[in-house]
Image (spheres, helix red, strand yellow):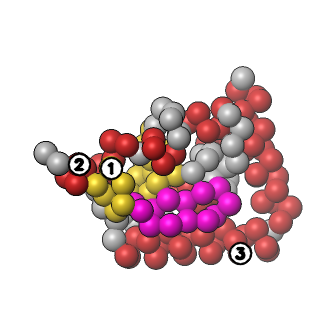
Amino acid sequence: MSSRDHERFGFLLNPDLTYRRIIFDVDHASDILGPRVLERTRVAFAQSDTQYEAIYSPEAREKGEEPNPVASMAANLAATDNASFLQDPASAISGSVIFVGVDGSNIDDGVVEQIKDAIRAVLNYQEDFPEEYELWYNAALNMRTVQD
């Protein structure tokens, strides 16, 4: 089996909302996210929509990396089917994530557009509700010290 058999199309999203589409080997995702333990969580970008996966490092939170608002919002939506924005700082995902299909499959242009819509929603929320966003952000960032 060649390394091409493990390559997938994914979407890398950083906490500062910079992003890029990537082709990567699922077995080597840590080359992109850093040499850490990697986990996956289900995410969704619209209520009652198809779910996808976010590959991330739980160690990012422990190391005090910034919370990723889009990944956090998408994980909350998948877990609760609640579209309320950034509700639970305790479950925030920190650091960069790679969005992929279920079981690490490729994502297509339609999913990429859903992710970009979620990025726009976060940017609008930051602009429209700066105090609420800052409270969520600081609480999510400070959860590391609470859990130590």
Q: Name the residue under label 1.
A: 25
In the rendered structure, the answer to whether residue 141 lies left or right of residue 73 reads right
SS for callout 2: helix
User: Taking 82 as reference, is 142 above or below it?
Assistant: above
Q: Mark 3 points at which residue?
A: 124
Identify the image quadrant of the C terminus. top right
* Mark closer to the chain start, 2 or 3: 2
* Mark closer to the chain start, 2 or 1: 2
Find residue 3 and name its label.
2
Disc 3 residue type? Asn
Residue found at the very far front of the displayed protein: 2
- Residue 43 in view: no
Count numbered badges in the picture: 3
User: Taking 112 as reference, is 71 above or below it?
Assistant: above
Q: Give the range drawn in magenta.
A: 10-22
Q: Is residue 21 magenta?
A: yes
**Residue at image coords 41%, 45%:** 29
Task: Assign the magenta stretch its main secondary structure.
Answer: strand
In the rendered structure, the answer to whether residue 81 lies left or right of residue 26 reads right
Tag 2 near tag 1, CB within 8 Å: yes
Q: Distance between the residues labelled 2 and 3?
A: 40 Å
- Of badges 1 and 3, nearer the viewer stands 1
Q: Position of residue 57 (x, y in %)?
A: 53, 39
Q: Few, some or many C-alpha atoms within 10 Å of disc 1 (few <14, some 14-19, many ≥20)? A: some
